Image (tube, rainbow, N blue to C red):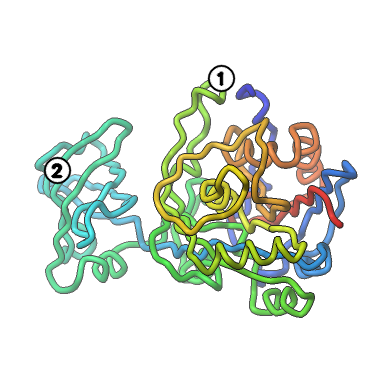
Amino acid sequence: MRLADLDYDLPESRIAQEPLAERDASKLMVVDVAADTIGHAAFVDLASLLPPSIFVFNDTRVFHARLHGHKDTGGKVELLLLRPLTERHDRWLALGRSSKAIRPEMRLTLGDGSLEAKVLAANQGGELEVLLTAKHSTIDGSIEAQGEVPLPPYIRRAPSPSDEERYQTVYAREPGAVAAPTAGLHFTDRVMRSLEDAGHRTAFVTLHVGPGTFRPVQVDHLDEHPMHEESFEVSVETAAAIHGARADGMKVVAVGTTVVRTLESAADAGGRVRATSGQTDLFIKPPYSFRVIDHLLTNFHLPRSTLLALVMALAGVDLTRRAYQTAVDRDYRFYSYGDAMLIRRAVS
């Protein structure tokens, strides 16, 4: 697959800068792979669009990963915390931004001054290793108090108080993501109840979304793209729930590309999902034989992104490109706060 296959034209006005007033008020494109058709529905119709299935959600929680501060010299600095490197959460992998290079041994004052960072190492790719110390609280507590919601780079505004709630799924439980699993942002208690009422089952995995989700592919041949790693976990209960649902003839619906990567990473050669945890750098692109996933609920993704490649692996390149052009033509809203797409491979 070539980089040009992941390109499409998107007017700036189609990129949603704010969430809708109601989470579940978004539009839902229905892409039927077997029939090669594109249909349109409302998100609240979701439960009626599939026979009883098991919906698998990512329960990661976005934390206040973006911190502003200054160097000892007074220069402004911004840190985006990626993941802790110790169980004490005092040592972190981070991305740094400043007018001048951030170097080892530098000391940074963050927030109101109650959180400090010492730069231990500057790695390739702009990643830093930093040691955090908190004056008046725990380190995790200070991060939440001094940091802010790390909105995606294509949302061209500062975070608002409403983002504290809206850039988070209603079922978020496990802190650790620097970006929301956006397919889940549409769900409300009402929609969750409608799934249950229609005979669908639910299960949860955890994958802590990293900044690589926004990183464009920059090589012509996708096989040469270095995929980012993300932490994931599949519990014993979730593995058993998926096995039980499949034994009962139910299909598996992944709520978001992060769930796809998690379940496909956790599956053995025969397609059985195992209870496991670790890091995954699985890059799903055409051609790919899915071992677990039958259907996918997802948002509309950036051009030249690994997420778009994953969608094409499931729906096919041509059908995906038609669907995206249809979304542009019919005023669908794109990206994190945008509308959704249901990809149905085969409905029986």
Left or right, 104 with respect to 314, comes to left
Q: Is residue 132 left or right of residue 32?
A: left
Which residue is under mark 2? Answer: 120
Q: Identify the residue shown where x is 54% and y is 36%.
A: 283
* Spot occupied by residue 38 in the image (x, y as percentages of width and height): 86, 47
Is 50 in front, or is 246? 246
Question: For the C terminus, which image quadrant?
Answer: bottom right
Q: Quadrant of the N terminus?
A: top right
Q: Are marks 1 and 2 in contact (CB under 8 Å)?
A: no
Mark 1 highlights which residue? 220
Give the crowd class for mark 2: few <14, some 14-19, many >=20 residues within 10 Å. Answer: some
Distance of label 1 from label 2 (alpha carbons): 35 Å
Residue 10 visible somewhere in the drawing = no
Q: Secondary structure at mark 1?
A: loop
Amino acid type, label 1: Asp
Which of the marked residues, 1 or 2, is nearer the chain's N terminus? Answer: 2
The residue depicted at 55 percent of the width and 66 percent of the height is 238
Label annotation for residue 266: none
Q: Amino acid at mark 2?
A: Leu
Residue at 62% x, 45% y: name it. 270
Write the residue at 79% across / 48% down.
Answer: 345
What is the tally of numbered marks visible in this picture?
Answer: 2
Which residue is at the front of the view, 312 or 27? 312
Where residue 337 sits, quadrant-wise, is: bottom right
Q: Position of residue 312 (x, y in %)?
A: 70, 37
> Where residue 103 sits in the image (x, y, percent)?
16, 36
Task: State left or right for residue 238 relative to residue 42.
Answer: left
The secondary structure type at the circle numbered 2 is strand
Q: Callout 1 environment at 10 Å: few (<14), some (14 to 19), or many (20+)?
A: few
Give residue 297's quadrant in the image: bottom right
Estimate the x, y position of residue 152 in percent, counting from the top left. 49, 50
